[in-house]
């Protein structure tokens, strides 16, 4: 690429950076939820086919949203550079390219849940600012054999750097104006959880083997997986929050935050799992939750006999279809406000979310929940069921090997991991070496049938290449299937297998 084209590309990138910065400032003043990058990213999440979402989770895990934002930035920079180069030969085509991006941003903004006309303003501002900025910068581009009074290369670089700098400062100003996150964080940090009317039994002494690199029986909040469709974490002030229960009910119920925290809350340990978790994956964790039984809330509304599903809705428009019986039977299905002894972290649903043992999160674990619509499966569909996933999502019997991994030394070796079948429980875990006979492992003491359980097995490791496999048997007699199936449409199956290299003792350093 020649020097003139490089300078044109720089002008394009600087102009778009300027436009996006001004847009962030406009969003901070007029529409905090309508940052162009965020709304475009959210729309891409919604439009992405299931295989693309699965691939992103498999590649990046809980960093999938960061990866998406980085990807958007790279694509924007490439398109901006292309617009700059194109403008030197076909100015109208370059402007149309920028306008097309702006129209896409406007569409992404106004089609979001709860959008208003003002949400279109930031993307529109970005389009106008980038278009005008590109023209202005290219007019200052140095031209060979030009009049000595024409702009120099140094002056051009100063202008492009200045435009990008103004954009960065404007973006920072917009972020400063978008103070909702900090305000809600401050509210959360000063909120003291009410004392539980029904405290959870203490974690049994034998529940955690304390083996290095084995997942702890209770997952710290900072390590708990996060998979959802919210590119920007919703900032919900508890003072403005309420839960509406409606649909096939005899009376509509609206519950405020003050009413919720005044109820006799209950503690319970529950293991949650994402349906996108591959065999042996880490998208599963256990926490101590504090909340109020959903069955009691539904009882206030007196659902009709026709109901067989509850459609929960998040403040950002996400929906989940939960079987009615899973919210009204004896399991600890709760509207949670606390996680491991503190208010819910913002990214895990503050101020309130659903926790339902025995179901994958896509049909139950709605964060930032604001509505429970009592309805029927044949009358309503949820976010993921519209995208090819099954409408009901019972958790499958699963087990995982956490240790050992990689290369080890010959001799007695602890093989350990976790197994789960929420709301049923684990009766036995077995380990196989090189497809040999299944040997029973030792189970830790389970907290409850709604949580995973640790297991361990002592293996006399001999030198060479080996493969370990694990399977679990549930309390009701079901044996984990060896059949390998992908996560779509209702969760992966198969035995977790781990390849191990065992070295002679003499190789130890």
Image (cartoon, rainbow, N blue to C red):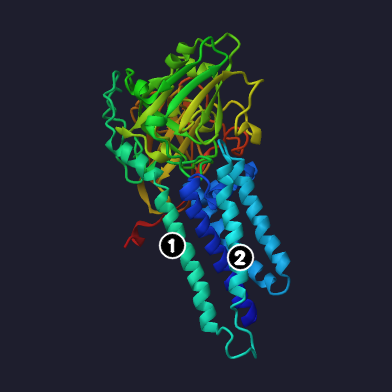
Q: Which mark is residue 376?
A: none
Q: From the viewer's perspective, is residue 281 above or below residue 243? A: below
Question: In this view, which residue lies farthest toward the front?
Answer: 149
Query: Residue under circle 2?
Result: 132
Q: Is residue 145 left or right of residue 310?
A: right
Question: Which residue is at a point 42% across and 29% down the rendered structure image?
Answer: 241
Q: Is residue 285 left or right of residue 36?
A: left
Question: Which residue is at a point 52% across and 50% down the rendered structure image?
Answer: 35
Q: Is residue 400 visible?
A: yes
- Quadrant of res 147: bottom right
Q: Is residue 189 left or right of residue 86?
A: left
* Front residue of 147 and 55: 147
Question: Which residue is at a point 68% across and 56% down the rendered structure image?
Answer: 100
* Front residue of 149 and 44: 149
Q: From the viewer's perspective, is residue 99 above or below residue 157? A: above
Q: Position of residue 327 (x, y in %)?
A: 48, 19
Query: Residue under circle 1?
Result: 169
């Amino acid at each position: 690429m020649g020097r003139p084209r490089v300078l044109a590309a720089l002008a394009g990138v600087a102009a778009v950076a300027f436009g996006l910065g001004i847009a962030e400032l406009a969003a901070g003043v007029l529409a905090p939820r309508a940052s162009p990058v965020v709304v475009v990213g959210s729309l891409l999440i919604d439009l992405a086919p299931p295989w693309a979402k699965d691939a992103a989770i498999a590649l990046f895990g809980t960093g999938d949203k960061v990866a998406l934002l980085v990807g958007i930035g790279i694509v924007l920079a490439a398109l901006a550079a292309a617009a700059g180069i194109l403008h030197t030969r076909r100015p109208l085509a370059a402007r149309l390219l920028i306008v097309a991006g702006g129209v896409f941003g406007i569409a992404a903004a106004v089609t979001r849940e709860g959008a208003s006309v003002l949400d279109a303003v930031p993307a529109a501002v970005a389009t106008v600012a980038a278009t005008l900025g590109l023209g202005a910068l290219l007019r200052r581009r140095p031209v060979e054999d030009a009049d000595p009074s024409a702009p120099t290369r140094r002056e051009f670089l100063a202008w492009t750097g200045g435009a990008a700098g103004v954009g960065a400062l404007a973006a920072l100003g917009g972020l400063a104006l978008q103070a909702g996150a900090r305000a809600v964080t401050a509210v959360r940090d000063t909120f003291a959880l009410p004392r539980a009317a029904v405290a959870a039994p203490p974690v049994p002494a034998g529940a955690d083997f304390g083996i290095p690199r084995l997942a702890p029986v209770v997952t710290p909040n900072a390590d708990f997986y996060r998979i959802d469709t919210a590119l920007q974490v919703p900032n919900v002030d508890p003072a403005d929050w309420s839960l509406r229960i409606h649909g096939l009910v005899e009376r509509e119920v609206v519950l405020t935050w003050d009413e919720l925290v005044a109820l006799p809350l209950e503690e319970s340990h529950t293991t949650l799992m994402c349906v996108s978790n591959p065999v042996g994956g880490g998208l599963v964790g256990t926490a101590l939750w504090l909340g109020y039984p959903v069955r009691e809330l539904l009882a206030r509304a007196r659902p009709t006999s026709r109901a067989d599903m509850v459609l929960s809705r998040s403040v950002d428009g996400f929906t989940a279809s939960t079987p009615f019986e899973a919210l009204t039977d004896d399991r600890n299905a709760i509207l949670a406000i606390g996680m491991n002894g503190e208010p819910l972290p913002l990214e895990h649903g503050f101020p309130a979310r659903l926790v339902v043992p025995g179901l994958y999160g896509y049909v139950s674990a709605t964060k930032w929940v604001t509505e429970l619509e009592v309805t029927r499966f044949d009358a309503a569909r949820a976010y993921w069921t519209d995208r090819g996933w099954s409408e009901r999502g019972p958790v499958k019997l699963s087990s995982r090997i956490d240790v050992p991994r990689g290369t080890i030394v010959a001799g007695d070796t602890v093989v350990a991991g976790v197994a789960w079948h929420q709301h049923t429980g684990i009766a036995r875990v077995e380990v196989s070496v090189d497809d040999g006979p299944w040997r029973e492992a030792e189970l830790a003491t389970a907290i409850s049938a709604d949580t995973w359980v640790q297991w361990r097995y002592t293996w006399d490791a001999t030198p060479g290449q080996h493969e370990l496999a694990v399977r679990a048997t549930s309390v009701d007699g079901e044996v984990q299937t060896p059949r390998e199936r992908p996560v779509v449409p209702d969760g992966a199956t198969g035995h977790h297998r781990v390849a191990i290299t065992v070295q002679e003792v003499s190789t130890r350093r």
